[in-house]
Image (cartoon, grey):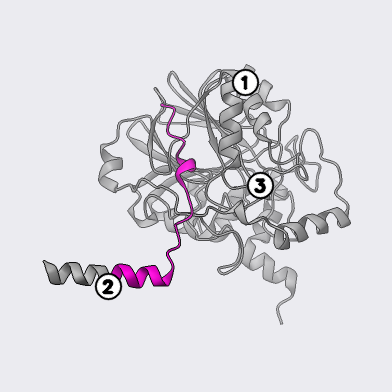
Amino acid sequence: MVSLPAFFSRTLGLTAAQRGRELSSSSPQHDGERFQNVKPRPEERLRKTLGIAWNVLFNKPDDTVPAGALPVDTLTRAQLDAAPDRSLYRLGHSTMLLKLRGQFWLTDPVFAERASPFKRLGPKRFHAPPIALADLPPLRGVILSHDHYDHLDRETVLALAETTEIFLTTLGVGDRLIEWGIEASKVRQFDWWQGVEVDGIQFTATPAQHFSGRSLFDGNSTLWASWVIVDGDLRVFFSGDTGYFDGFRAIGERLGPFDVTLIETGAYDAQWPYVHMQPEETVQAHIDLRGRWLVPIHNGTFDLAMHRWQDPFERVTGLALARGVALSTPRMGERLDLAAPHRGERWWRNVVEPVAVPKAAWRLCASRDAEDVKSS
């Protein structure tokens, strides 16, 4: 009989995390056993943790999921091939497709129906990806911020393996990919403030305040990070997942200012302030980074918190307006020009519940349609 730890080791990549510990032991972020934040978050008591889990599972409001279908701009391979450089597309949650110097880069790829280790349990997508996984163009690279299920989907990564040239990851996450079967020669792993230049584009892993793990046994065994992308005179910040911390100011001072910041605005709650930001903090982080245009991400795809699904959009829109921050809210699949972003529509306000028509009314309409056909 296979033991429970062995089961998780095989299915969730625990052995990779154990190997990563040896690789990461020299990191300033590693205490010899686990990775840690610059400012450690307070220890959570078991009672509080169980209480949060109970509320998430059994006390969710009905409006944490959309009442109707979300507008999604369907993409084709031909459209992407014809798109100009410095194009960006939101494919859902934190999965962003960027076209730089004629080649494509994908952040935190998740095309799965659920952000979960299970096929039939866990947060389900609100919308299909704007383009099917099989229709994506070959990728120059995939950029990974950390290993949580809503940012790293095993099946998606394995499907992309043959058509992706390079995987840029944080320490330990690369070991997971290798354990899953990705060629080691394609994987590059980085600590905070480390990076690489690829085809003239500089990628740097930068600090974040979060945590990691894919099972009950491997918490914080891999590193989490934000990423900075510099393409000539274009500077883009991708937050991954993070709480608010002083690191944003340091990143802005060292690597800013940024033309576009892609910052998480969703899955927040007062019960977990150290790992996700409230919208007020998202706007402040953008200001700390010395950003020009703010694009709120990590929203609109999965139900991961207790707030209304549209609240992240509404709150960040009002806050950005009050503080004079240029905000862009493209639809899923809508092209955004990184060199000259547009504001986008308030598309989430048009997502309404379909009007229910009583069966008697349906029968009346059907009989009228039949009469119309006869008369014509």
Residue that carries the numbered disc 3 in the rendered image: 307
Residue that carries the numbered disc 2 in the rendered image: 367
> Marks 1/3: CA distance?
24 Å
Q: What stretch is highlighted in magenta?
A: 342-367
Residue that carries the numbered disc 1 in the rendered image: 287
328 sits left or right of 146 in the view: left
Task: Identify which residue is drawn at 85% across, 42% down.
Answer: 42
Q: Does the magenta stretch include residue 352?
A: yes
- Along the viewing direction, whichever of 49 and 156 lies nearer the viewer: 49
- Along the viewing direction, whichever of 289 and 373 lies nearer the viewer: 373
Query: Picture coordinates of residue 78 (x, y %)?
Result: 25, 45
Q: What residue type is labelled 3?
A: His
Residue 369 figure quarter: bottom left
| Sequence-first tag of 2 and 1 | 1
> Marks 2/1: CA distance?
61 Å
- Can residue 233 be seen from the camera position used here? yes
- Can residue 204 be seen from the camera position used here? no
Query: Picture coordinates of residue 115 (x, y %)?
Result: 57, 57
| Sequence-first tag of 1 and 3 | 1
> Marks 2/3: CA distance?
44 Å
Q: Is mark 3 on a helix, strand or loop?
A: loop
Q: Is residue 243 magenta?
A: no
Q: Is mark 2 on a helix, strand or loop?
A: helix
Identity of the residue furthest to the left in this view:
376
Q: Is residue 102 above or below residue 69?
A: above
Task: Identify which residue is drawn at 61% across, 49% down.
Answer: 173
